[in-house]
Amino acid sequence: MKNCWSRLAQGETLMGSFISTGYPINTELMGLAGFDFLIIDLEHGMGSEREILSQLYALQNTPAIPVVRVESHDKQRVHRLLDIGVQGIMFPRVDNAAQARDCVAAMRYPPDGVRGVATIVRAAGYGAHFNDYRTESKSNLLTIIQIESAEAVKNVDEIAAVDGVDVLFVGPMDLSTSLGIFRQYDHPLFLDALNKSLDAARRHNRVAGFLLPSVDTMRHYRDMGFRFITAGTDVFLLKNAAAQLLRELRNA
């Protein structure tokens, strides 16, 4: 198991991107690019749970840690993904501490949580090292909680205080929409929400994450204190690269 949390705990900044197409070859190409982690998107992406296993195989020989953003907090969706070898779960639309506790519980085996126990699963080498996997899973699996509403910002300190939350990840488009200032990332309301999230992360020893609005903002948000940083998607990169190539051909 690639240990993402140990690198974050040592103060590293990790960089990742989203996989929206659900295609294993795209996932493999993104992994081979050298990203620290990749988030396979089941909330807004075009893939489904059926494609996750092939994408995990695609990432197996790359540096990228496989993370999945689920579309709901339902524990059974999380269990299936963890059993096949996903190493982190991103939970969208977490608005309060009670929801955060449910998310953490879905990630952990009893008595720490409610994850169902099955020994012959891919994540545990089909039973070959289940005891080690069960022991290590509490510290090696990333629980990423998205802060993307005004309600979540109001409760961010209580959310960050929940034992087992690893990353507070700010979703700027949803958050700015919830605040009534869509994409106004320099607006005082948005900046206040960012600072409250960062303060809560520092206070409770959590990592702060952020989806960059553009690559040229990397240094700005890193200097603010965000260390789990994402940019782009496979769709965005392919679309832009194709458009750039066509422009160059026409100009030539």
Image (tube, rainbow, N blue to C red):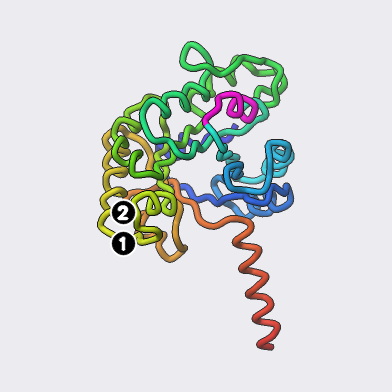
The residue where tag 1 is placed is 186
Label 2 sits on what residue type?
Answer: Phe
SS for callout 1: loop
Q: Residue 161, percent across and down? A: 32, 28
The residue where tag 2 is placed is 190
Q: Quadrant of the N terminus?
A: top right
SS for callout 2: helix
- In the figure, is residue 39 to the left or right of 59? left
Which of the pair 34/75 is nearer the observer?
Answer: 75
Q: Main secondary structure of the magenta part?
A: helix
| Residue 75 on the magenta span | yes
Which of the pair 32/39 is nearer the observer?
Answer: 39
- In the figure, is residue 145 to the left or right of 46? left
Q: Which residues are magenta?
A: 73-81
Label 2–label 1 contact, CB within 8 A: yes
How far apart are labels 2 and 1 at the CA level? 7 Å
Label 1 sits on what residue type?
Answer: Asp
Q: Residue 242, percent across and down? A: 67, 70
Q: Residue 243, percent across and down? A: 65, 73
